[in-house]
Image (cartoon, grey):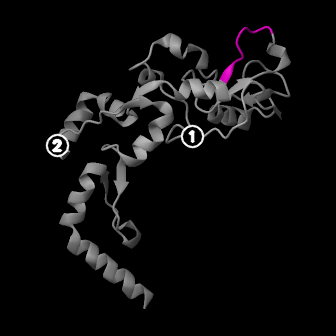
Amino acid sequence: MNIVEDEKAPKETITSVSVEPFCFDKNWILQLNQPEQFENFICLICKQVANYPIEICCPQHKDIDESPVVGENCLKEFLKTNKNSCPVEPHENCIYSRSGVIQRHIGALKVICPLQFQQDSQTPSQEKQQEGEENEKIICHFKGKIKDLNDHLNSTCPLKMLDCWYKPFGCEYSCQKYKLNDHLCSEVKVHFELVQKFIQTLQ
């Protein structure tokens, strides 16, 4: 297999725009975008919007109007079982390159919070179960560009799951961000005892 750099864009480090490396769900992208805004960025392998987009630029496909695009993770998984092959059509010595241009286009797409989309997509039975666990339904109002998604999820999203601060001492509790303070306040004694036990193991 061969890797070539994108000659049309300046060399740069392409940073992650997703908590996970998988391609982006089209239904999520469609919440705030029209299909024509991303139809040229669909991953050839999984048929979702490519994350870490890579262009397939083998000479065997030179007659194709647009270079086929795949998500980096999808290509890695494909090559694990199809070594040195091409996802467009069977042949050896696949040539591909990371595309900074496409990455910037995808990064500029406006989206809602993926955790809010997941919450909105719950089935009635899942919603009923969640209502039994909490009295109020928290809404994340984030609407921003994909490239800003990590900052949102890591700093401001109220739906993000967090581990208890005392996990290193043995507390296995995890919850959405807005619930964490209540847990810390209500379990002071438990956490104190966990810290005591931890200190004893060091003596």
Disc 1 crowd, CA 10 A, few/some/many (<14, 14-19, 20+): some
Q: Which residues are magenta?
A: 63-69
- Residue 56 falls in image quadrant: top right
Q: Residue at x 72, y 38 (%)?
A: 80
User: Which residue type carries mark 1?
Assistant: Ser
Amino acid on which disc 2 is placed: Gly
Residue 24 % position (x, y)? 51, 29
Spatial CA span between label 1 and label 2 = 36 Å
Picture disc at residue 197: none
In this rendering, would 106 be left or right of 70? left
Position of 151 with respect to 79 (left or right) is: left
* Residue 38 in the image, given as x and y percentages of width and height: 54, 17
Q: Is residue 181 above or below residue 103?
A: below
Q: To which residue does mark 2 refer?
A: 132
For the residues labelled 1 and 2, say whether their Cβ atoms are less than 8 Å apart: no
Residue pictured at 81% horizontal, 27% vertical:
94
The residue sitting at the left extreme is 135
Q: From this view, report whether residue 194 is shown above or below residue 25.
A: below
Q: Secondary structure at mark 1?
A: loop
Observer able to see residue 88? yes
- Nearer the observer, 203 or 110: 110
Q: Residue at x 73, y 35 (%)?
A: 11
Image coordinates of residue 157 in percent, x first then y, are 34, 43
Compared across the picture, whether 22 is left or right of 195 comes to right
Q: Which mark is residue 16?
A: 1
Q: Secondary structure at mark 2?
A: helix
Q: Is residue 68 magenta?
A: yes
Residue positioned 75% across, 9% down in the render: 64
Q: Position of residue 146 (x, y in %)?
A: 48, 31
The quarter holding residue 57 reads: top right
